[in-house]
Image (tube, rainbow, N blue to C red):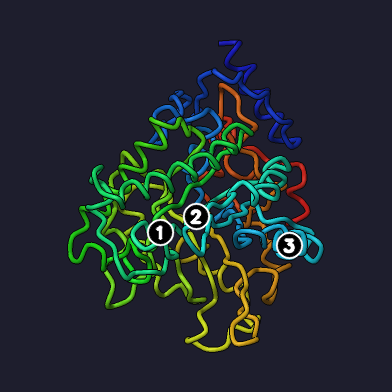
Amino acid sequence: MRRIVALLASVWLMLAVACATPPVAPPNADVHIQHRDSMEHALPLPANRHASLDARRLLAALQAPHNGCGIISGQNIGSGELVTTEYDRLVEGLQRTTGRYPALVGLDYYDFDDDHHDYTASHPPLLAHWRAGGLITISWSAINPWTGGDAWDTRQANLAELLDESSAAHQAWMTHLSAIADALGELRDAGVVVLWRPLHEMNGNWFWWGIDAHPGDPAPYRALWRQMFQYFSEDRGLDNLLWVYSAAGAEPSLPAADTFYPGDDVVDIVAQSVYDGTLQRFEYDRLVALGKPVALGEFGPGLPWMGPQDGDYDYRQLLDLLTTRYPQTVFWLSWHDWVEHDALVAMSIFANRHAAELMNDQCITTRDELAWRASSPDAIHLPIQRNEACLPTAWCSSGDRASGVVHRHASAARRS
């Protein structure tokens, strides 16, 4: 009893004076989450049962209840040779103007044609961001295995054929998978956990793996996802991946976001692309019902055909929508800007209005506030060591604070 009292007193003291970082568990140790009832449970395993300890820690942090607080900020930096320049403009530039780095940085393994590409050439900014305490997500706009054209080449596609080992398309597909696995393996060897977002927006008709490749039948897509999962997880040992199923924003003519969901056993996070600053096309309830952490895999204020995207979007609107209408959203990833008809199409946080207010809001997690690595056998930190003013009521009782689940950051006062 004295030991328990002493432990609780110690935790309370840490919370009262802004806790020190707990010791990191040994690499092969079991990590537990201590709940409000003081019972301990092993970290939930990701879809890949061999997932690394850091992957397990991160997923546990993303699964923690937050109810509109601690939303992880994210910025995409494009693809290929542009990522280093875009990291400086969109990520470092955001820090220079707001004082904050986005917590999450993403890019796309994108090819224009069926040629040999060095995907690892885009890794330096990712590695730098990770080593500075940030998070990483990667999408893959895959080459068409039949034509050798880019991801938007829908002239020929039959997803079932990709699983036929005797077909030329299957051989091309496996060559592409192997090259991607090699690149992801470099990140694994560097200790980087990747939120892996392949075969995205499958309920649209603009990618070769979309609905025109398997009209009215979600089974071929699900089988293709599961084949990739098996190859990456079992054959290639990519234990650093958390798997993100990411549909397109709902439109009347498109299937719902959950139509092609491949199964709980091969998905860790569910997401949707929404290019609408009002989030009216965010099928949030359908995604929440799948029982996984929910995210905005791509976000933009709008698309050119919806009107000029000239940097006039008020990013405080996104914050308000996420915290009030979609409170279980764990992260969003703002897309990068591009040039169309000699005009900038402004998607990024940096290129739009009120970035400083967004990045310095008490309910937004920036890179310096990520705390999931600071785990101990007694507790897992939430994604952010949160400002108590932002904590949902359910997490603010003295019993919760004594449990060791919620930790207050010494710098929280700067946002109060």
Q: Is residue 392 left or right of residue 121?
A: left
Residue 36 seen from this side: no
Residue at image coords 49%, 37%: 60
Residue at image coords 42%, 45%: 175
Mark 3 vs 1, N-terminal side: 3
The foreground one among 62 and 320 is 62
The amino acid at mark 2 is Ser
The amino acid at mark 3 is Thr
The amino acid at mark 1 is His
Q: Could you tell me residue 47's position as x and y percent?
A: 38, 36
The foreground one among 338 and 244 is 338
Q: CA distance from mark 3 to mark 1?
A: 25 Å
The foreground one among 4 and 85 is 85
Residue at image coords 54%, 76%: 301
Q: Could you tell me residue 57's position as x and y percent?
A: 53, 33
Mark 1 vs 2, N-terminal side: 2
The foreground one among 181 and 96 is 181
Mark 2 vs 3, N-terminal side: 3
Count of number-bearing discs: 3
Secondary element type, mark 1: loop
Q: Could you tell me residue 180's position as x and y percent?
A: 49, 45
Q: Is residue 294 left or right of residue 218?
A: right
Label number found at residue 85: 3
Q: Are marks 2 and 3 in contact (CB under 8 Å)?
A: no
Q: Which residue is mark 2?
A: 139
Give the position of the N terminus as an image quadrant: top right
Q: Which residue is mark 1?
A: 200
